[in-house]
């Protein structure tokens, strides 16, 4: 007769089907399309789509490549650990792209746009004096 296990392992049935959803959410947060992420990790967009929708199981090697490309711990992708990205302070790609475009504007237009952004932040209850907001 088999012995009862001494330790009870956590149920991972729910976390395994969320892996694809986690990848999609992290990819979108970084401002990447499926095609862009797929190119970064060396697979096709269709294959990445199958992983994100859980039509296919994701090989460990792909999880590692995605982890590196998105700059997050593999635990975050797997839904089993820390939720913090490897580099907490890095802004999203979308924000960086906009900032680069703003830098191309003449100084007067930059100042006007930054004033508009400051007013929007103030309306959201965030002031530019907030230590989390750097200039």
Image: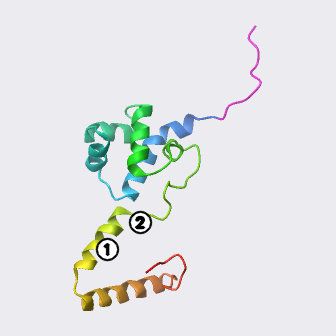
Residue 111's place in the image compared with 45, above or below, is: below
Point out the tag, 2 or 1, that comes first from the N-terminus: 2
- Which portion, as a residue range, is magenta? 1-10
Q: Secondary structure at mark 1?
A: helix
Q: Which residue is rendered at x = 26% and y = 38% of the image?
A: 46
Left or right of 6? Residue 15 is left
Please tell me whether residue 125 belongs to the stretch shown in magenta.
no
Are circles 2 and 1 on residues that touch, CB within 8 Å? Answer: yes
Q: Of helix, strand and loop, which mostly describes the magenta segment?
A: loop
Residue 60, image x, y percentages = 45, 32
Residue 125, image x, y percentages = 52, 83
Residue 102's place in the image compared with 77, above or below, is: below
- In the rendered image, the residue lying farthest to the top is 1
Please tell me whether residue 3 belongs to the stretch shown in magenta.
yes
Position of the N terminus, as image quadrant, is: top right
Q: CA distance from mark 2 to mark 1?
A: 10 Å
Provide the residue designation for mark 1. 99
Position of the C terminus, as image quadrant, is: bottom left
Residue 115, image x, y percentages = 37, 89
Asked whether residue 58 appears in the rendered view, the answer is no
Asked whether residue 112 appears in the rendered view, the answer is yes
Callout 1: 10 Å neighbours few (<14), some, many (20+)? few
Provide the residue designation for mark 2. 91
Residue 24's place in the image compared with 98, above or below, is: above
């Amino acid at each position: 007769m088999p012995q009862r296990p001494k330790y009870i392992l956590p149920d991972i049935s729910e976390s395994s089907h969320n892996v694809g959803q986690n990848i999609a959410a992290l990819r979108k947060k970084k401002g990447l399309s499926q095609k862009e992420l797929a190119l970064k990790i060396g697979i096709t967009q269709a294959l990445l789509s199958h992983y994100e929708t859980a039509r296919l199981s994701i090989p460990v090697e792909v999880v590692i490549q995605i982890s590196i490309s998105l700059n997050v711990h593999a635990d975050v992708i797997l839904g089993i650990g820390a939720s913090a990205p490897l580099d907490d302070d890095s802004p999203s790609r979308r924000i960086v792209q906009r900032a680069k475009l703003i830098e191309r504007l003449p100084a007067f237009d930059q100042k006007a746009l930054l004033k508009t952004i400051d007013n929007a932040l103030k309306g959201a209850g965030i002031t530019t004096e907030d230590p989390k907001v750097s200039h």
